[in-house]
């Protein structure tokens, strides 16, 4: 069983909008701590045999300038890799960039802090509501990483009603983060919520809490 409220609260979410050469970008930032050593978390994030256990099968070049592909979704190419603390890669398109940063936890409890930043073009969404097209899916990924690091093996967990209920809550959390960022109006956020809901919670009764 997933403690949905605890898992939602475990992630800090930030939405930002900024200008770059050639246009604007929307970025989502997720921060979460894991009760596992940094080298174990790094392996979970970068080794193909491990990635397929909690995320998706991956093929191709993971350590050099070549391209890699996640089964059935997007591919990319590594821009920078400094084990076990930094991985920067394109995701699907060259102007969609994911940066993973790992840090060792403070104090006797140890653990590892993970930051995920995903920056995507402002167009065609044209507002910070673009965060709702990427942020909730990363939340599901970080939940899967937690399931793996806890030593649990739940086949098909990512499609379960329980995870869809979790997704519904994180969609609301991302709507709040987007509103707090001041980068989108109410109608734009509502459209983003509708798109994320259709993608991540297709089997739930959307009229219920």
Image (cartoon, rainbow, N blue to C red):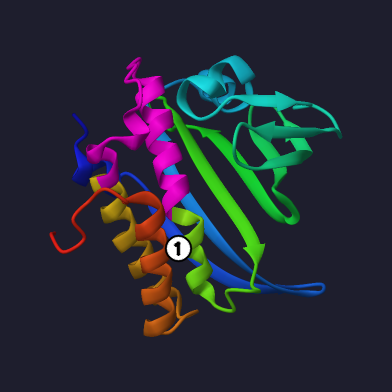
Front one among 98 and 113? 98
- Give the structural element (helix, strand or loop) at label 1: helix
The residue under the point 59% across, 24% down is 57
Q: Quadrant of residue 62?
A: top right
Q: Is residue 163 shown above or below 123? A: above
Query: Residue 43: horizontal and vertical position, in percent?
Result: 58, 20
Q: Magenta stretch: residue 99 in it? A: no
The residue under the point 69% across, 52% down is 97
Q: Quadrant of residue 88?
A: top right
The residue under the point 34% across, 20% down is 150
Q: Is residue 200 shown above or below 159? A: below
The residue under the point 45% across, 63% down is 132
Is residue 187 toward the left or the right of residue 102 in the image? left
Query: Residue 104: horizontal and vertical position, in percent?
Result: 51, 30
Is residue 193 toward the left or the right of residue 85 in the image? left
Q: Magenta stretch: residue 142 in it? A: yes
For label 1, the residue is: 132
Q: Which residues are magenta?
A: 136-164
Determine if residue 177 is in view: no
Is residue 173 toward the left or the right of residue 114 in the image? left
| Residue density around tag 1, few if under 14, some if 14–19, many if 20 or more, within 10 Å | many
Front one among 121 and 39? 121
Front one among 39 and 23? 23
């Amino acid at each position: 069983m997933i403690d949905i409220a605890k898992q939602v609260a475990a992630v800090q979410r930030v939405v930002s909008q900024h200008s770059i050469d050639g246009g604007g970008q929307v970025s989502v930032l997720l921060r979460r701590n894991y009760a596992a050593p940094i080298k174990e978390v790094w392996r979970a994030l970068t080794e193909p045999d491990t990635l397929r256990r909690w995320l998706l099968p991956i093929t191709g070049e993971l350590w050099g300038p070549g391209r890699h592909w996640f089964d059935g979704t997007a591919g990319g190419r590594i821009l920078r890799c400094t084990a076990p603390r930094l991985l920067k890669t394109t995701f699907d398109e060259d102007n969609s960039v994911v940066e993973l940063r790992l840090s060792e936890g403070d104090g006797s409890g140890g653990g590892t802090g993970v930051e995920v930043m995903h920056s995507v073009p402002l167009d065609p969404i044209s507002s910070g509501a673009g965060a709702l097209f990427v942020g909730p899916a990363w939340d599901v990924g970080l939940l899967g990483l937690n399931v793996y690091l806890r030593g649990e093996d739940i086949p098909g967990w990512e499609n379960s009603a329980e995870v869809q209920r979790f997704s519904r809550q994180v969609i609301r959390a991302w709507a709040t983060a987007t509103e707090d960022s001041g980068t989108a109006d109410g109608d734009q956020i509502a459209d983003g919520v509708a798109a994320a809901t259709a993608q991540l919670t297709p089997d739930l009764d959307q009229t219920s809490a």
